[in-house]
């Protein structure tokens, strides 16, 4: 029988032990989420630094370019929503394959895709340019258009399709069916009913994409730098890569960006307030597919073309590129070789980076999972004081671009008392990835825990099991499908990540993604492509295994 | 099991004193006190929001009382003044929820075995006990079935088996039959009663269904607004309700507005010979009676009225009668042969011994 818990008197009617636990968790979450933001804001309090930073034209144009490029998010949200609707609600030949391809694209890292598009659209040796006109190359990867193209195809649109799909699935199909009965054609139904009803979801997705786009780093670094296009993240990189690092300027720039994000969030709230009917979505939606007639062949063809252009073609070209003597030069005699594969695989740096990447991703996945599960459970189930605050703070890292998180954690390690031992260690990378993935991890866990009835836990307690046993014997098994999903997302995100960890990694904690970046930035594109193929393969295999496992779990329940 | 003092037969198995709980300032449970004797079935009966479930949850250890004490088998398990609270797992109670709360990731047998595993019983003993319980609740052959494939009645029995497997001191039941359809509910009610008789486990039973309360309980505690309005044997609660609320909540009630006179109570144009119960003549008073204690007559004595409407229900006919000289209408059930017709003058004959008077 469990021990009698006798508690000393405390304020607020709660026993002191619980009060302490609540405060402890709150302090911990606040420390790891709010500290980086506070470091940035307080680090930037210096009028001279502000003046210097913002009179420097490159800094100003970087902010401008960043927000210009971020406009791809609302655009992709609308396109992605339309595609998701077509895939889910209309009868399309091959829709399952298209959906699957989108799902794979969602996970594929963007750096290998960028290399592939360089191979195709470089003004000097781009394969497509070469085919179209050897004299005046019509396309230039190193431009705003090139950056946008890579982002939109490889990331923005597939992300939006995946993000908005569930919203469409939840929408009761009878809203649309009534529209049909009232005399609307399928696309009128989409335009006049589905789109307006789900406007709040689209706005939210667009905002999320907007904020996340400020995080983008590797595409801008590879495609923007040669054309002297700098964005916020690449500017921060330069400021910190400076010797000595110009922390204050970086923080001033970041504070300004955070302010703009705050304004955007407020505008979003105001916009969203108009849609107070967002909760009328039906449950247990009936599910019928609209017949769009012969247009389905056209639509299906267009979507096949899209996934071919955004996934299969660049993937194929990446593999081709990794086997070329000289990246992109198809016309030299005997252009193909496996030398780069042999070189890379034999390189001790590569082996080290591969091991680091796998250890880092797995550690961030497992440890993160445990932390997110505990935090989410506290937020959803406990009556601890300050749990609302914990909930809010757990979202904070979401608004911080990865590179900024990297800068402030680097600063904390350098300046923070007793944190020096973390410098350059793999442990510091594990920690920062757990922080960076906390919003999505905690959010997914919360959703999942909310779905299980609290009485399942209460029954276990009354049956004689303590809180810890109840947590691992009842709660965790019930959220297992979600645990798998969160692990995979954290694992893959960590595997792909460059901007968050770039300042924290050292030679001994070099990862595969950073090594790839290094090769790509030093014009060793062939070796970069080799690592790109390997990273992409790892990511796709993990995603596929998880998909199978996740599906099995879903079928067994 | 910590039980320092030997238990005397008279000592209650559960003792609740002055239990109070408020949410956001509004009291949900207000000074609730009761005892539960070994082998007894005590039902907390009341409308939703009366505090019955919250009381049960405090006994279970799922809520912390603001004021009051709870003892289980003479052991203090919750005390607001001492700020101590034994967590649910330390109380050795059984609990059945309205939703059953059967764990979907475990089979029937695993659900029942869980509390035994928690108690570190050895494997063979667990297997034997689980088999026993499965037989007891008549789930033979379903041991390895996934619980999600069970019907409501079967889930209910898994919940019962799980809660009883470790022989808890008290079984707490929170509206256990409310999710079943009418036929199944009657059936399960009878089975529950038989099971309780066989095992002799004390039940603390929460329901809003007065029929369940009447048929299952040793005693019924009728709750309203967080307080116990009356706690007594079912027949006493029905026949001698302690308050207007109890009268109205338990069983059907006919209400008449009347005025006290020297030798009775005047309702409309008729005088009912009933001792006015200390009320002074001239006072307005409410007179209530159970429907079965009223009969409709065409002649004789009684409260005079006129039939406003009759409604056919198949098994009975209901007759709305307007009391003469007032605009009060009472509805009385009449026999199916030769019912009165609308407009007919009738007399409501009431047994004066069955009348309750409520000063207004």
Image (spheres, coloured by chain):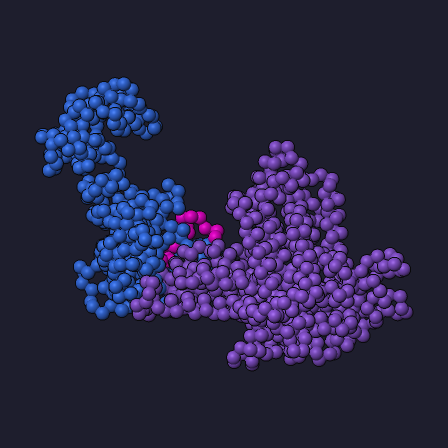
The x, y position of residue B298, in whole percent, is 21, 20
At a point 54% along the width and 45% down the height, the residue shown is A274
At a point 60% along the width and 63% down the height, the residue shown is A256
Give above or below for B286 relative to A365: above
Asked if residue B152 is among those painted magenta in the image, a careful observer would answer yes
Give the magenta-colored segment's residue range: B148-165
| Chain letter, colour purple in render | A
Name the tint of chain B in the rendering: blue
Image side of residue A474 versus residue B213, left or right: right
Give above or below for A264 relative to A174: below
Q: Nearer the viewer, residue A22 or B75?
A: A22
At a point 58% along the width and 49% down the height, the residue shown is A201
Give above or below for B158 relative to A397: above
Q: Nearer the viewer, residue A98 or A382?
A: A382
Which image quadrant for residue B254?
A: top left
The x, y position of residue B8, in whole percent, is 18, 63
At a point 83% along the width and 59% down the height, the residue shown is A128
The main secondary structure of the magenta stretch is helix
């Amino acid at each position: 029988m469990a021990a009698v818990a006798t508690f000393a008197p405390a304020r607020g009617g709660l026993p002191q032990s619980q009060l302490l636990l609540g405060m402890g968790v709150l302090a911990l979450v606040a420390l790891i989420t709010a500290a980086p933001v506070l470091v940035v804001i307080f680090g930037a309090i210096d009028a001279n630094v502000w003046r210097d930073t913002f009179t420097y034209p490159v800094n100003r144009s970087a902010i401008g370019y960043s927000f210009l490029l971020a406009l791809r998010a609302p655009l992709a949200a609308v396109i992605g929503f339309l595609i998701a609707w077509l895939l889910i609600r209309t009868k399309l030949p091959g829709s399952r394959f298209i959906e699957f391809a989108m799902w794979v694209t969602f996970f594929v890292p963007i750096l290998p895709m960028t290399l592939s598009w360089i191979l195709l659209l470089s003004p000097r040796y781009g394969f497509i340019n070469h085919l179209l006109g050897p004299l005046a190359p019509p396309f230039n990867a190193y431009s705003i258009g090139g950056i946008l193209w890579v982002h939109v195809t490889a990331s923005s649109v597939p992300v939006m399709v995946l993000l908005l799909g569930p919203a469409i699935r939840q929408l009761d199909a009878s809203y649309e069916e009534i529209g049909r009965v009232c005399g609307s054609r399928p696309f009128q139904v989409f335009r006049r009913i589905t789109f307006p009803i789900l406007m709040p979801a689209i706005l939210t997705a667009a905002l999320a994409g907007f904020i996340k786009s400020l995080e983008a780093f590797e595409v801008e670094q590879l495609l923007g730098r040669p054309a002297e296009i700098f964005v916020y993240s690449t500017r921060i990189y330069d400021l910190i890569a400076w010797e000595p690092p110009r922390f204050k300027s970086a923080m001033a720039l970041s504070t300004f960006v955070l302010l703009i994000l705050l304004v955007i969030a407020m505008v979003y709230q105001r916009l969203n307030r108009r849609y107070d009917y967002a909760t009328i979505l039906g449950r247990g939606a009936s599910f019928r597919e609209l017949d769009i007639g012969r247009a389905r062949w056209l639509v299906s063809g267009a979507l096949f073309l899209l996934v071919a252009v955004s996934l299969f073609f660049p993937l194929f070209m990446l593999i081709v590129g990794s086997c070329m003597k000289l990246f992109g030069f198809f016309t030299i005699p005997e252009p193909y070789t496996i030398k780069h594969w042999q070189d890379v695989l034999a390189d001790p740096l590569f082996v080290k980076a591969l091991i680091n990447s796998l250890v880092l991703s797995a550690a961030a996945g497992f440890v993160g999972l445990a932390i997110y599960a505990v935090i989410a459970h506290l937020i959803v189930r406990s009556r601890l004081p300050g749990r609302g605050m914990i909930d809010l703070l757990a979202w904070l890292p979401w608004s911080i671009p990865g590179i900024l998180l990297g800068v402030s954690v680097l600063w904390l390690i350098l300046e923070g008392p007793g944190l020096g031992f973390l410098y350059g260690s793999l442990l510091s990378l594990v920690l920062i990835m757990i922080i960076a993935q906390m919003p999505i991890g905690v959010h997914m866990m919360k959703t999942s825990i909310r779905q299980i009835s609290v009485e399942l836990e209460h029954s276990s307690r009354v049956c004689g099991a303590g809180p810890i046993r109840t947590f691992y014997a009842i709660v965790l098994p019930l959220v297992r499908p979600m645990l798998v999903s969160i692990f995979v997302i954290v694992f893959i995100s960590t595997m792909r990540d460059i901007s968050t960890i770039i300042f924290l990694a050292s030679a001994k904690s070099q990862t595969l993604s950073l090594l790839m970046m290094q090769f790509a930035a030093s014009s060793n594109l062939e070796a970069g492509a080799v690592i790109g193929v390997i990273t992409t393969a790892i990511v796709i295999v993990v995603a596929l295994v998880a998909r199978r496992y996740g599906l099995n779990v879903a079928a067994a329940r | 099991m910590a039980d320092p003092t030997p238990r005397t037969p008279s000592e209650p198995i559960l003792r609740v004193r002055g239990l109070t709980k408020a949410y956001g300032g509004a009291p949900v449970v207000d000074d609730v006190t009761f005892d539960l004797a070994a082998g007894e079935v005590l039902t907390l009966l009341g409308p939703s929001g009366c505090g019955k479930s919250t009381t049960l949850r405090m006994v279970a250890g799922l809520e912390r009382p603001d004021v009051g004490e709870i003892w289980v088998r003479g052991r203090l398990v919750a005390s607001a003044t001492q700020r101590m609270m034994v967590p649910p797992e330390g109380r050795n109670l059984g609990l059945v929820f309205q939703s059953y709360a059967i764990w979907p990731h475990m089979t029937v047998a695993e659900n029942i075995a869980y509390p035994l595993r928690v108690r570190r019983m050895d494997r063979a003993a667990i297997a034997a006990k689980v088999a026993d319980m499965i037989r007891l609740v008549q789930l033979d052959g379903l041991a390895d079935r996934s619980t999600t494939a069970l019907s409501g009645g079967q889930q209910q029995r898994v919940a019962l088996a799980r809660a009883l497997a470790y022989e808890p001191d008290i079984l707490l039941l929170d509206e256990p039959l409310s999710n079943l359809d009418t036929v199944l509910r009657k059936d399960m009610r009878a089975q529950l009663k038989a099971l309780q008789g066989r095992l002799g486990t004390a039940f603390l039973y929460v329901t809003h269904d007065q029929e369940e309360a009447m048929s299952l309980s040793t005693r019924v505690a009728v709750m309203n607004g967080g307080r116990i309005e009356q706690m007594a044997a079912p027949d006493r609660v029905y026949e001698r309700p302690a308050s207007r609320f109890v009268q109205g909540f338990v069983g059907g009630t006919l209400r008449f507005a009347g005025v006290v006179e020297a030798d009775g109570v005047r309702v409309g144009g008729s005088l009912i010979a009933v001792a006015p119960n200390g009320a002074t003549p001239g006072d307005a008073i409410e007179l209530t009676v159970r429907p079965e204690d009223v009969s409709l007559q065409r002649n004789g004595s009684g409260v005079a009225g006129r039939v406003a409407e009759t409604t056919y229900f198949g098994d009975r006919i209901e007759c709305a009668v307007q009391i003469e000289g007032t605009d009060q209408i009472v509805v009385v059930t009449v026999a199916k042969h030769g019912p009165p017709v609308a407009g007919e003058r009738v007399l409501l004959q009431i047994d004066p011994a069955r009348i309750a008077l409520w000063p207004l």
